[in-house]
Every structure is written in C-alpha cells, then in structure tokens.
Amino acid sequence: MATSPEALASVSTLDCSGKTALITGSTNGIGRAAALALGRLGADVIVHGRDPDAGAAVVASLSEVGTDATFVAADFTDPDAVRRLAEATRSWTDGLDLLLNNAGGLFQEKRLVGPGVELTFHVNHLAPYLLTAHLLDHLREGARVVTTASEAHRGATLSLDRLRDGGGRAGMAAYSHSKLANILFANELGRRLHAAERTVTSNSVHPGFVPGSQFGRFLPGPLAGLFRLLGVVPGTSSVADGAAELLYVALSPDTENATGQYFTGQQPAAPTEAARDREAATRLWTQSAAMLGIDEPLAHVLAKPGAASD
Ligand SMILES: NC(=O)c1ccc[n+]([C@@H]2O[C@H](COP(=O)([O-])OP(=O)(O)OC[C@H]3O[C@@H](n4cnc5c(N)ncnc54)[C@H](OP(=O)(O)O)[C@@H]3O)[C@@H](O)[C@H]2O)c1
C-alpha cells in the first residue's frame, strides 16, 4: 500500500478532532489527497472545487472515515462565487483552524474575468486573497493559513503597474507571475497578522513537481498527456508527496511558529529576491483590495509605530 500523506509528513499520530479545515481545490489532485488525510486525522473538512461529482465523491470518502464534511462549489473566476464560499464556510462552522489556499492551475486561456482581471491572476491570486479577507475574522486563534505556491515563481517579476492584465502574460508566464504573487501574499499576510497580534500564521509551500495530479489537463493537446507520463520519471513527486508538503506546513509541530515563510521539501526555503520584496508585497496587497473594490484587509495594523517591520 502507498504511504499516506500524513505518514510522509510525520503527522499521522496527530489528533485533529475538533478542528475544521477549508481546502480550496480539494476535488482533485494534491488538495483532494490533503483533504482525505485531514479527514483521517479527525478534522471536519470543507471541500471546494468546481466539479460537483468530484466534490460529492470526496465528501463520501470523508464520511466513510467518520468525518463531518461538506462540498461547496465556487468558480474562482467569479468573485461573487468566492464570497458565497466564504459565507457557506461561516454558516457551516463556528471557526476555521486551517485555511488551505490550494486551488489553482496553469491555464492557456487568455481573458479578463471578474472585475476585468486576467484569468490566471484572478483564479490563482485574487480569489484566495478575497476568500482570506472574508474569513480573517473567522480564523480561530492558532489557525494556520497555507497557500500553495510553486517553484515556478522563479524567473518572474511582479508587474505592479499592470496587475489587472497580468502584464500581458499568458500560459506559463502568467502562471509563474501568479505563483510569485502567492508567496508575496502569504508573506504579507503573515506580517500583518503578527502586527495585529493575532496568533494565526501564514506560509506558502511548493508541493513538488506532481505530474500525477490533474494539473496538466489545461495544457494544450499532447502536452497534457506528456505531463502525466512524467509521473514515471524518477525525482518527480506523487500526489501523496505533494499533499504531505501541505500537511507539514499546516499541521506539524515543527512549523507551529513559522509565519511569512516559504517551504519546499518540508524545509523552509529562500524564494527569489522578487518574492522577498516587502514593498512589492505591500503594494500587491493594497492594489488587490482596490481591484476587488474592498477595504484593505488588516490595513489598520500598519498605522501602528513599528508594525510590519519585523
Ligand atoms: N502539480 C504540480 O506539479 C504543481 C506544482 C507546483 C504547484 N502546484 C499547485 O498545486 C495546486 C493544486 O494543483 P494540482 O496539481 O493538485 O492540480 P489539479 O489536480 O488540477 O487540482 C486543482 C484543483 O483546483 C481547482 N480549480 C482549478 N481551477 C479552478 C477554478 N477556476 N475555480 C475553482 N477551483 C479551481 C480544481 O477544481 P475542479 O477540478 O473541481 O475544477 C481542483 O480541485 C495549484 O495551486 C497548483 O498551482 C502544482
């Protein structure tokens, strides 16, 4: 039998009963494996994605192990759907202990969605930003927010003057740009939560190169099949390995106090200079709120002397 994600993350003896987790993008791939592992550890789980059949199947598997679980469909190209997911979460549970911002993909399509924002940037960055903003006051003290980023951020620089159209990028370039935004977002969230004297942490994680997920389905024609075939190449990660990377940051006692960090291979790692640029992270945060037409989340903490400086 294949090793479980919880064993791979050395968290299989943890008891997560009484905890509630929302895992976006848990109808498939890495998120699905992480959701099932959290259910086996006793957590209540909110499953999210677009595909209702896949969502129902994950909920059924979670119910089989005695987990309280529900599925909420929300297409992350639509900010109103993201808001409804936040509302459904608030009504389903009194508070969240784990928010895993994992939904995302490498999309070939180039179009503007929601408030006129490039699709990949919207799905991969703006939607989790909005979801997190709507759930900040629903996160229990000690909660952990984990955002699935990628080593694909390397090589990207943030187009702060053209966030709305993603700097004109598409495909892989748009994906890398959005994954850079994920790391900057997670870091800035960590800093602001700390400045607000919340005990909630925020980190980002690269799950490894995981050809066995459904990630390659959005690649053009033969590339999708080729991507899946790469699963047999030594050095690539399985879906369970990818889920273990998330679980390590979300649950391990080793990462309990980590915040504003980027992890890969179950280790803290240095992302690129562009991903460590605090000024860019702050501007991304402010501009993301403006693009969505919402008040800047945790804006007040920056007014405090010395806030967000450590
Ligand atoms: N696979 C890799 O090699 C790799 C490497 C680095 C980082 N990552 C990151 O890992 C995360 C999970 O990817 P994966 O490999 O597990 O891919 P996956 O198998 O394709 O799963 C992606 C999940 O995101 C959801 N999703 C995609 N587009 C969405 C949208 N517009 N609205 C709402 N949900 C949406 C999917 O829901 P439906 O299926 O229901 O549509 C699915 O549950 C992503 O953030 C990806 O960027 C993956």
Image: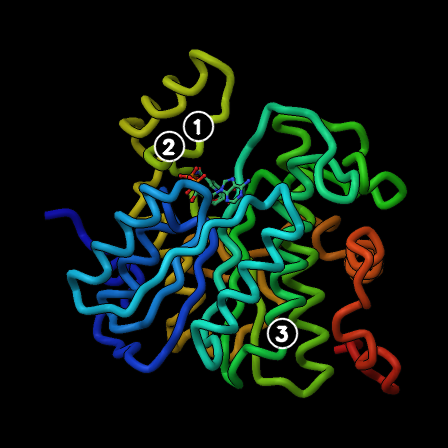
Is there a contact, CB below 8 Å, between mark 2 and mark 1? yes
Front tag of 2 and 3: 3
Q: Amino acid at mark 2?
A: Pro
Cβ of disc 1 within 8 Å of ligand 1?
yes
Q: CA distance from mark 2 to mark 3?
A: 33 Å
Q: Amino acid at mark 1?
A: Gly
Q: Quadrant of the C terminus?
A: bottom right
| Residue carrying label 1 | 216
How would you rate the neighbour count of disc 1 (Cα within 10 Å): few for under 14, some for 14-19, many for 20 or more? many
Task: State the image coordinates of residue 223 (x, y, percent, origin top left).
Answer: 45, 16
Left/right of residue 62 with respect to residue 225 in the rendered view: left
- The numbered mark, 2 or 1, whose residue comes first in the sequence reads 2
Can you say whether 196 is above or below 135 in the image?
below
Left/right of residue 127 with respect to residue 114 in the rendered view: left
Left/right of residue 4 with respect to residue 163 in the rendered view: left
Q: CA distance from mark 2 to mark 1?
A: 7 Å
| Residue carrying label 2 | 211
How would you rate the neighbour count of disc 2 (Cα within 10 Å): few for under 14, some for 14-19, many for 20 or more? many
| Residue carrying label 3 | 136
Is there a contact, CB below 8 Å, between mark 2 and mark 3? no
Cβ of disc 2 within 8 Å of ligand 1?
yes
Near-viewer residue (62 or 120): 62
